[in-house]
Image (cartoon, rainbow, N blue to C red):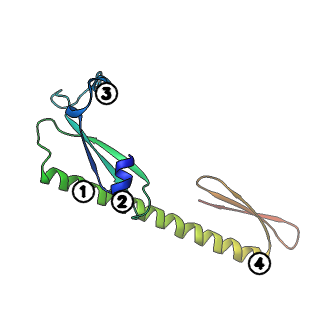
Amino acid sequence: MYQVNETGSLVYKDFRRLSEEDRTKLYGIEYRGYGDPCYGAVVLPIQPTSTRTHGYLIVGLNPRRPYDAAYQNFHHGTIDHLSTTVARVKLMTEDFENAVDAELARQYEVNSVTILYSADITFCTRLLKDGKQQSLLIV
């Protein structure tokens, strides 16, 4: 993972170059397809921005296909799609949070508001001027 963070690009690992001790850690893996063990893996960084890695996708390579330019282009396309998707979700989440904060600030100016945040919802209770409470659930 360190090498992926340093380069900001995918990293190819050839299992055939591993020590015997490291290769024994791969025993017992159930290989799909034709049952042939894969000879390597590629670590793909998920980076919606050039400064931050949000995660990694580790992909085993097809043992019946060489790791050539076409295969690499497929992995680069996968990185682009995943990173774009993560960036869009992050942007939408920030926009939603900003809209909620703006609405709560507006409500706070009018009434006294108590705010409770949880993972996916925001629950607000405001105390109206006549002493009654009004609840607002934002999903």
Question: Looking at numbered disc 1 in the image, what kind of residue is underneath it?
Answer: His
Residue at mark 2: 83
In the picture of the structure, the residue carrying the numbered disc 3 is 22
In this figure, which residue is indicated by the disc labeled 1? Answer: 76
Q: Residues within 10 Å of mark 4 (few under 14, many from 20)?
A: few
Q: Amino acid at mark 3?
A: Asp
The residue shown at (62%, 69%) is: 100
Q: Is residue 8 above or below residue 22?
A: below
Mark carried by residue 109: 4
Q: Is residue 9 left or right of residue 61?
A: right
Could you tell me if the residues under marks 4 and 3 are in contact, i.e. CB atoms within 8 Å?
A: no
Image quadrant assignment for residue 62: top left
Q: If you read the primary sequence from the N terminus, does the residue marked by circle 4 or circle 2 appear first?
A: 2
| Disc 2 to disc 3: CB gap under 8 Å | no
Q: Residue at x 77, y 78 (%)?
A: 109
Compute the Cα span from label 2 to label 3.
31 Å
